[in-house]
Amino acid sequence: MFGHLHIENSGLYDLVINILTIAKKTTGVICLNIILQSGDFVRKSLELHLFFGRIMKEHSIFLEAGFVGKDAAFAQQADVFKCHFTEVLRETTILANGVVGVETLKSGEFVTDKTLRAEQTTQELSGIAIDSVITTEENILAPSIGRSPSHLEAKVSILNQKVIDLTTALVQFKTTILEGMLKGRLFTFNFPLLIIHIRREAIFYIQHLERLQRREAIDFVQEAIEEEKFWNRQMAEHAEFISHLLDPTESDLIFKANNFAGQFDRLEHIAQGGGQGVVTLSQLTGETIAATRALRDFKAAGTEGLLTCKIKSIIIPLLADHVLREANHYLRILNRSKQDLHI
């Protein structure tokens, strides 16, 4: 059993991972915990905000677009959240230049080659103002050049707490909407499950930030399991939403979406400890990577089809790019887990 490790240098980090892997093969026992250092705290926090801050901003846009005229107050509140998260994203983009990893920047989880067009089209269709300048700025972010960004620790810690408070308020807003829908007091064009889905993501964001604020040691095995449980469920629901928002005449796409939903339902069940037989983390991660890559490609093609008006649906273009970025995010996490755990 190994204790907590303080590792700042990436080369030393890789060496320790190799040593621990050999130890696991020899003894069969390992506790792979790495203490979070200030540089990693800054980088992980900013990468989290670049991804989830944009996700929360877009949740607010989807909520705003779904309300009917009589619920203008709800739409206005959603717009306020959109503006707040736009500011979070703007502040994060300034802090993140030269800090975040090149692998993360290239993953397509912050912006894709379709994000700007999706924002512009969604603004035209909905009338909701979307600040696309931030998207352009994120596209030219410089990656880290290896220096520790520990000098930003205090600023990032303050930002984290501000975002925790803001996202907690957004969770409550989503809860209010859901309760109103389920009790027949509120109508929105968003499915109740979609509200549950985006509320779950907001809570997940908060949990990650609180863990970072406590500087908790990273348990790579436990983190890999938790991420797969969470994102397999989200991927399954993405496929379900796509299936139900496509025009009924898009039968081939609906069939494919339903197949993806079933595949990720099964993967989630396995990750939760269900299913027949023994499935190792290595096997589960390998199968999940293949499934997520296929779903990512399906989403990418679908987003392009929507932007070029070749697919009939009631899917707003930014929602399509949104779920594409989430698949890219999950793929990076899966590949990183495979690398960290040597599986």
Image (tube, helix red, strand yellow):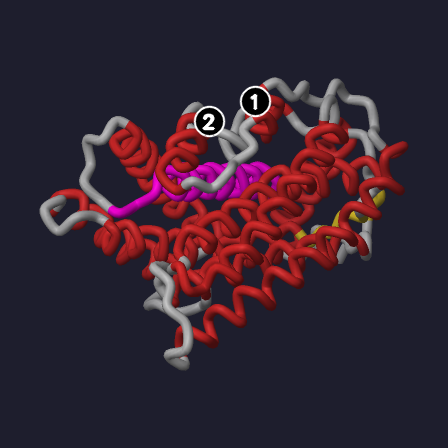
The answer to whether residue 326 is magenta is yes
- Whether residue 290 can be seen here: no
Q: Position of residue 125 (x, y in %)?
A: 35, 38
Q: What residue type is disc 2 on?
A: Leu
Marks 2 and 1 in Cβ contact (< 8 Å): yes
Q: Is residue 111 left or right of residue 266?
A: right
Q: Is residue 3 left or right of residue 165?
A: right
Which residue is depicted at the point 22% across and 44% down?
313
Compare residues 147 and 48 and report the one nearer the observer.
48
**Within 10 angstroms of label 1, few (less than 14), some, or many (20 or more) residues?**
few
Q: Position of residue 310 (x, y in %)?
A: 19, 31
- Residue matched to label 2: 116
The answer to whether residue 79 is magenta is no
Q: Which residues are magenta?
A: 314-343
**Within 10 angstroms of label 2, few (less than 14), some, or many (20 or more) residues?**
many
Compare residues 274 and 136 and report the one nearer the observer.
136
Which residue is depicted at the point 74% across and 38% down?
16
Quadrant of the drawing holding the N terminus: bottom right
Compare residues 218 and 104 and report the one nearer the observer.
104
Which residue is depicted at the point 56% across and 46% down?
57
Q: Is residue 253 left or right of residue 318?
A: left
- Looking at the rendering, which quadrant does residue 110 occupy? top right
- Label 2 SS: helix
Q: What residue type is disc 1 on?
A: Thr
Q: On screen, 67 above or below 302?
A: below
- Residue matched to label 1: 136
**Numbered label attached to residue 166:** none
